[in-house]
Image (cartoon, rainbow, N blue to C red):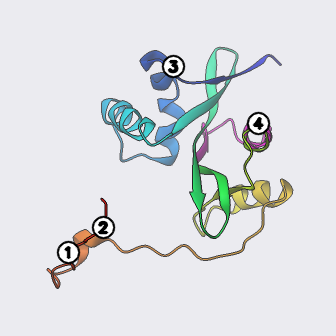
Amino acid sequence: MTIELFVADSDEEILSCFPAFSALRPHLGEQAFLSQVRRQQTQSYRIVALRHEGVVRSAAGFRFAEFLAWGKVLYVDDLTTLPGATSRGFAGTLMDWLVAHARANGCQGLHLDTGYARHAAHRLYLRKGLQFNCHHLALDLGQLPPAIEPVPHRGRA
C-alpha cells in the first residue's frame, strides 16, 4: 500500500483534497472551498493530505494558535476521509503526523472540536490519546434579532 503525505500548497493540490473535504463540509462548492482555504491560509491554516493509489483519501486542515489557557497548540479544524475509505487507517496516519508536527513546532498540545454524533471519529481520537475536556459553545449571529450596539474599543485593533 503506497501512501504519500503532503502539505497542499498549490491550487491543484488543494483542489485534489476537495472530494474528501466535501464529505465533511458538503455546503462548500469546489471554487468556494479553494477561496476559503486561501483566505484561511492568511491565518496559518494548512492542509495535510494522504494520497493512496493516486487519490486523496483523507485530509486535515490545521493551524497553529496560542491561548492563555493552553499555550501554543496545533488546532485541527477539519479531519475527513472519503466515504468508502474509512476504517483503513488513513485518518489515524494523519493524526500521527499532526501530533508529530505539533511536537516539532513546540506546541504544548493538539486541540480539535468534534460533533456529538461523530462516534467513529471519537473512537479514533480516544485511541490516539485525546480526551474530552470541555464543551464548545457557539452563537449563530445570523439567527439573532438586532441587539445593543457594541461598546467602542479604545485599545489597539
Which circle marks residue 152 in the picture?
1
Callout in the foreground (2, 4):
2
Instruction: Rate crowding at label 1 as few (under 14), some (14 to 19) or many (20 or more) other CA atoms within 10 Å.
Output: few
Q: Which mark is residue 13?
A: 3
Quadrant location, the C terminus: bottom left
In the displayed structure, 5 sits above or below 87; it is above
Q: Identify the secondary structure beneath mark 1.
A: loop
Please say whether residue 93 is one of the residues in the magenta stretch.
yes
The amino acid sitting under disc 3 is: Glu
Residue found at x 50% / y 31%: 19
Mark 4 surroundings within 10 Å by alpha-carbon count, few (fewer than 14), some (14 through 19), many (20 or more): some
Which residue carries the number 4 mark?
97
Q: CA distance from mark 3 to mark 1?
A: 42 Å
Q: Residue at x 69, y 63 (%)?
A: 119
The stretch in magenta equals: 77-101
Q: Quadrant of the N terminus?
A: top right
Q: Nearer the viewer, residue 63 or 55?
A: 63
Residue 106 screen position, x and y as percent: 74, 45
Give the mark, 3 or 2, whose residue is nearer the N terminus.
Answer: 3
SS at mark 2 in the image: loop
Question: Quick check: 135 above or below 111?
Answer: below
Q: In the picture, residue 5 is in which quadrant?
A: top right
Q: Measure the alpha-carbon separation of dots 3 and 2.
A: 41 Å
Mark 3 or 2: in front is 2
Percent x, y of residue 94:
73, 37
Q: Amino acid at mark 2?
A: Gly
Amino acid type, callout 4? Trp
Give 104 or 21, whichever is nearer the viewer.
104
Label 2 sits on residue: 155
Quick one: label 4 or label 1, which is nearer the N terminus? 4
Q: Earlier in the sequence, mark 3 or mark 1?
A: 3
Name the front one of labels 4 and 1: 1
